[in-house]
Image (cartoon, rainbow, N blue to C red):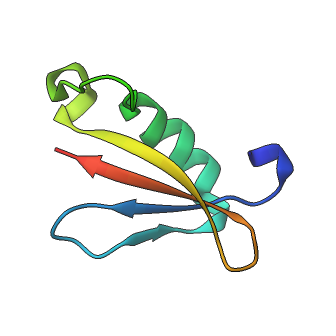
């Protein structure tokens, strides 16, 4: 996705406002935060198997202009 252009990330965490990641921080956010905590949507996630006891389930949406938005649903 990053090779195709800009990708917007947003974190959805129960009890908190949506957290939009700045466009210039998205690649580092993906590599350093999301990838180590990425859960398989087809499997049951055990939080003990992830660093710091939380994980993300991600889905791709399209913004009003068609640009991709990656929604990172945080589970803890």
Q: Residue at x 48, y 33 (%)?
A: 35
Q: Residue at x 50, y 49 (%)?
A: 59
| Left or right of residue 4, residue 6 in this image | left
In the displayed orientation, state which residue is furthest to the front.
Answer: 42
Snapshot quadrant of residue 36 = top left
User: For this rendering, which residue is in front, 73 or 62?
Assistant: 62
Snapshot quadrant of residue 8 = bottom right
Q: Residue at x 35, y 42 (%)?
A: 56
| Left or right of residue 37, residue 14 in this image | left
Instruction: Examine the rendered structure and indicate whether residue 4 appears above or below residue 66.
Output: above
| Left or right of residue 45, residue 6 in this image | right
Q: Residue 23 appears at what percent x and percent y?
A: 64, 66
Instruction: Examine the rendered structure and indicate whether residue 75 appears above or below residue 39.
Output: below
| Quadrant showing the C terminus | top left
Instruction: Examine the rendered structure and indicate whether residue 64 appears above or below residue 20.
Output: below
Snapshot quadrant of residue 24 = bottom right
Q: Residue 20 appears at what percent x and percent y?
A: 47, 70
Q: Residue at x 22, y 38 (%)?
A: 54
In the displayed orientation, state which residue is furthest to the right.
Answer: 4
| Quadrant showing the N terminus | top right
Q: Residue 2 appears at what percent x and percent y?
A: 75, 47
The total number of labels drawn is 0
Q: Residue 43 appears at what percent x and percent y?
A: 32, 22
Instruction: Examine the rendered structure and indicate whether residue 23 appears above or below residue 36.
Output: below
């Amino acid at each position: 996705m990053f090779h195709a252009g800009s990708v917007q990330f947003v974190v959805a965490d129960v009890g908190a406002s949506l957290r939009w990641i700045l466009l210039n921080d998205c690649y580092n956010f993906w590599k350093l935060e999301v990838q180590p905590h990425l859960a398989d949507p087809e499997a049951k996630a055990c939080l003990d198997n992830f660093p710091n006891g939380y994980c993300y389930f991600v889905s791709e949406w399209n913004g009003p202009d068609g640009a991709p938005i990656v929604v990172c649903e945080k589970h803890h």
